Amino acid sequence: MNQKKLVIRYPGGKQRILNFIMPFLLSREEITERYIEPFFGSGAVFFALNPARALLADINPELIDLYRGIRFAPLKVWEIYESFPATKKAYYEIRAIKPDGRDLAFKAARTLYLNRTCFKGMWRHNSKGEFNVGYGGQGRRWVINQEILKEVASKLKKMILKCSDFEEVINKSIEGDFIFVDPPYRPGEREMIHAHYIYLKFSYSEYQRLAKALRGASDRGVKWAMTISSHPDILELFSGNYIVPIPKGTGRKPGILTNDSGEVLVLNYRKEEPL
């Protein structure tokens, strides 16, 4: 799948650094059980690996409903998505719609529309849990098309999509599974405060909970890889693992590549470094 045509815009997505991180990850053939992703966003790594079996999860129900809607009815999602007006006024009217009670295809189309036309693809909610990112224009809306949604639906067909907290997902992993972890973070900072993705606040205590869950997975013989901030406080939680600096990444500004990313790739296994 063309990584430039992923379904959703995701400033923290890994499509821009795939060429660097992929050689360090297990291949499709090396994953004997499931590929597991507890913070499923743009799906860049999942689509690149194209695993035979996968458990894809996120705590954001709108995100999971987006992928469920595309999986079950890609043509219907496209039909609704295509019908939404291309104006700033329409954007705010569609943003104000309460998705509860709507069918899955409409929910998916609405989320896709908001993501594709909001400011820089940001994903932020207010204290009421309502999507509240401002309008960004139509320039990125038609990068995707009906064929892309059909391809995504095909790749998700046999995969499990689950709305869940990361700890529950990681704790169900078994030997033979491979977990890719990409939690919300701002490179170089201890806590995510005003980042591009805020569904629920991901604080330092959440990193502590994540570290404990991953230690448990390691004890069960599960292999995992994680992209994370290089802040010393956070790295200390994952000491004893193999840490690879990521030379180029999104850095502090959403969507902007930098040569000083402040990110690292953490692995609980050692894989020979690519030439």
Image: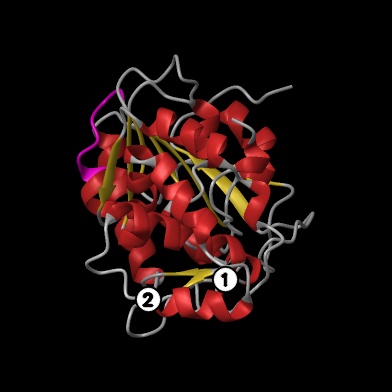
The local secondary structure at tag 1 comes to loop
The local secondary structure at tag 2 comes to loop
Nearest the viewer among 8 and 173 is 8
**Residue bounds of the magenta highlight:** 170-176
Where residue 243 sits: x, y (%)?
56, 43
Q: Is residue 62 above or below residue 23?
A: below
Tell whether 249 sits left or right of 96.
right
Where residue 12 sits: x, y (%)?
58, 57
Nearest the viewer among 252 and 51 is 51
Q: Is residue 123 visible?
A: yes
Point 49% across, 56% down: residue: 81
Where residue 83 sits: x, y (%)?
51, 59
- Residue 145 colored magenta? no
Q: Is residue 25 visible?
A: no
User: Badges 2 and 1: C-beta atoms under 8 Å apart?
Assistant: no
Chain-order first, disc 2 or disc 1: 2
Q: Is residue 240 above or below residue 23?
A: below
Q: CA distance from mark 2 to mark 1?
A: 34 Å
Residue for badge 2: 97
Where residue 54 sits: x, y (%)?
34, 31
* Magenta stretch prevailing secondary structure: loop
Q: Quadrant of the N terminus?
A: top right
Point 42% across, 57% down: residue: 237
Q: Nearer the viewer's eye, disc 2 or disc 1?
A: 2
Task: Look at label 1 and name its amino acid.
Answer: Glu
Nearest the viewer among 271 and 65 is 65
Residue for badge 1: 189
Nearest the viewer among 73 and 239 is 73
